[in-house]
Image: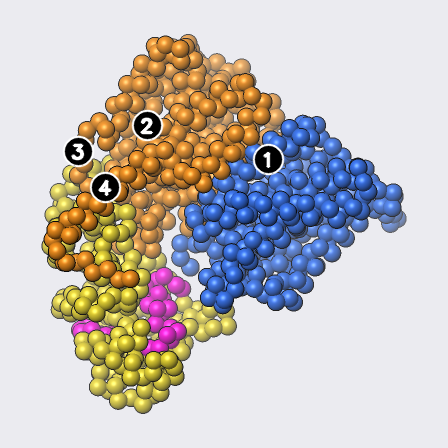
Chain colours: A orange, B blue, C yellow
Amino acid sequence: MKTKNNILQDPYLYIFIIFLVYPFLPYIGKYRSVGTELLIWSIFALSFNLVLGYSGLPSFGHGAFFGVGTYAVALTLLHLTSKDVTISLILAAFFGGLFTFFYGFIIKKKRGIYFSLLTVAFSQILYVIGFRWDEVTGGETGITGLQRGGFLGIQINNPITYYYFVFVLFVITLLVIRKISNSPVGKVLLALKQDEKRAQYLGFNTERQVWFIFTISGIFAGLAGGLHGLLHLSAFSDTLHWTKSGDVVMATLLGGGLANFYGPIVGAIIFISAREILSSFWDNWLLLYGLAFVVIILFIPTGLLGIVERIREKKHFEQFNNNRNNIGSKNTQEIT
Amino acid sequence: MNTTLCLALLFNGIVLGLIWSVIAIGFSLVLGVGQTINFAHGLLFTFGAYFFFSISRNTSFWIAVIAAPILVAIMSLFLEVVLVRRVYGQDPLFGLLITFGFAIAMEEVIRMVWGKAAYSVSTPIFARGQLILGNFVYSRFRILLALFALTILLLVLWFMSKTSFGAIVKAGMFNSEMISALGHNLPLLRTLVFVMGGLLAGLAGVIGAPLWSIKSGMGTDVLMPGFIIALIGGLGSIKGTIIGGLLVGITTSLAVLVIPRFTDIIPYVMLIAVLFYKPKGLYGEVTILGEVRE
Amino acid sequence: MDLLRTENLTKKFGELIAVNDVNISIQEEGILSIIGPNGAGKTTFFNLLTGYLKPTSGKVFLKGEDITNLAPYDIVHKKLSRSFQIASYFPEFTIFENIQMGVFNRLGYSYNYFANINKLKDVHKETEKYMKMLDLTEQKEMKAKFLSHGDKKILDIAMCLTVEPEILLLDEPTSGVSGTESTKVFNFIKNLSKKMKIVIVEHDMDIVFSISDRVVVLAQGSILADGTVEEVRKNEDVQKAYLGGFTEGGYEDAISGKSK
């Protein structure tokens, strides 16, 4: 489809500028770790949306691949090298991809309810390992007290350099995932979400497509998890628990990942900010967290940007309806 | 290897399997007829346990046994009418999320009402004592609880295979459109099945309350084995669910001998293995929305 | 050599035998129609031929090659394509994008993660070619879900063409389409039959008898009759089956195309 690439239709530049100047904004700029958290969750939600929004696969265990990345970073810093995080982050992405590659193969033919439940099951396997295997993962207490060191010789120890380090990785991720979503594969994914049988009879091996995109998603989820570990300098097994996967689903849905490429970023920004604010002064904030799911599903299932898409679609329909009436009765016979 | 230990583990496994089966059947019925993943099923179980605890402490044990499941059934009616009904026929993720969100919010309510501390139920007088076979000793209360679970399972089995309502429910699991085509009221059927699932979750809560410590997160812990057994047994098969429950329960329990720290993994690994080789589950007659193609 | 051949093809759903021991050879020319009363196993038979269902027993051969256990996408690559009873297309895509999908695959872009779809000139050119054939160029930017029912059916068939099939299986191409539109759909099909083998499952007897070169009648999963239009029309078993099959409308309606 040919669309004019103006800023309104592709808010990439806005997002870039907002995150670029964030640390210097009044009032909120000083919460650098929150800003970093937003960037990390945007990476995670964007990668997750390749599975949920593009392919229509209701994964509910993606938090596990995030967690795998966190542990990969924590363990390499602990046992391999604590001076440089390069290898750690590469391994975080690698293991995120390896686990999704392996598991994607097992569930590539499953859809709908089965897909959801099997992703939950896999996430739980990793959780039990993380929780019980004390001598490696630290079990219940997790791994703490890590050092961030440098990245290829660049010091990323202070919060602001780390913020910009994550920012660069965020921009790269955004560009790569945007590239994929505009590629033939991006179209194939959208197609198999709408009518998989049709896509198969056009000759697409949709199972393999699902398997591959699940893996790609896992690579970025692992990277996000690794960055998260570096931000908090720790790894805990509860990030692997299936209920934690609700977070990324929430972020993606809330922003409108089902309808718009940038939905996950919008959702991640709103969700993480709300979580940070609420959980800091209200013990029972989970009550609101739970109710938010209910409200989203009942009232805005396509998310915030989904509302924009719906208005756009209405215009689209009206436009062609007018065209039709102008052309005359050609091709307009409707069956009731 | 120590025979008495093995025997005790086997008994534990059977008790565990039977309770898990009760939870799994309720989950499975809703999944089959409503095509909805009810992640609030664990919450209903938790409420069963809390109601049982509070009522039995304030009135009597037997009133609590009757009242707790009924209260949970009423709660599930409310949940179905207000929320779940709106997501039937939509993306399966929606049903999952709406029940998930509801469960998280209500767990928080439980913590606000009952506090964060865990409770336990004391053994009633009639059930105290031990079963002794040679040098094998086993809690009499546990055996009674297992028998109670077994009775419930057999009742459900009878209900589903011998009554006409059971036949309609089964048909609904095969093909929910067929239900409307046959002139039955599908929305009503779904509501009834959801309430039935709630009742079973409540009963499971009553059984689980004395076995495990009562805390807000207890439902999340049993939800997982519940859905796993539902899928392993196969949708639409009560027999499969019971056999699946016993299989998973006993294996998990005996796994202590081999991998003492990682027994929790067993159900998940079993699920993946079973579904990889038998996508419909052990006794499943229905494929729901699962496979791309045969 | 036969283009498509089945060998003792059988499909059971539990107790129900949907397709029972069917042997059929499909040669290279003309239009073959498969007819039969409701529940005769026509669609199941199609699903078995195209890899959507796996047969309980028996085999399917395409140009002498066993394709029984191949997945749909592999069968499509062997130049067999099919449409669906309920028009199957991508509702959220524009018509252009719908057609484009098939072209992507044929030109080998299935696993291309980095090409910009708007800059693929070869895909664009190929797609335009089909757009002209469809006579939908004016509406190419319209989402497919806003098309009329008949045009959806044509879109479905056109998408099959993008894989350049040698044999095309059409499952009730006129079901749910109004009278004037169904003529349009059939003219379209008739034109196609000059270029490729076409197999149709159809309810509308009128049209079946007017365009088919060969008719196969299925009843209760088995072949009841097989021959030219004249032979089938005179076959007594067929007449009986239809009297039994269409108890409401009866044979006359079935023959005159008012079955639905």
What amino acid type is highlighted by mark number 4?
Lys
Residue A4 numbered mark, or none: 3
The span from disc 4 to disc 3 (Cα, nearest Å) is 17 Å
Point out the frontmost of discs 3 and 2. Answer: 3
Question: Which residue: 44% across, 27% down?
Answer: A271
Residue A39: quarter of image = top left
The residue at which mark 4 appears reads as A315
Image: A153 above or below A187: above
Which contiguous range is marked in magenta? C26-54
The one of A18 and B242 positioned closer to us in this rendering:
A18
Badge 1 element = helix
The span from disc 3 to disc 1 (Cα, nearest Å) is 47 Å
Task: Give the crowd class for mark 1: few <14, some 14-19, many >=20 residues within 10 Å.
Answer: many
Residue C38: quarter of image = bottom left
Which circle's residue, 4 or 2, is located before the other in the chain?
Answer: 2
The residue at which mark 1 appears reads as B106
Asked if disc 4 and disc 2 are in contact, CB closer than 8 Å, the reply is no
Please provide percent x and percent y for residue B111. 64, 29
Task: Give the crowd class for mark 2: few <14, some 14-19, many >=20 residues within 10 Å.
Answer: many
Quadrant assignment for the N terminus of chain C: bottom left
Which circle's residue, 3 or 2, is located before the other in the chain?
Answer: 3
Please provide percent x and percent y for residue B26. 61, 51
Please provide percent x and percent y for residue A111. 43, 49
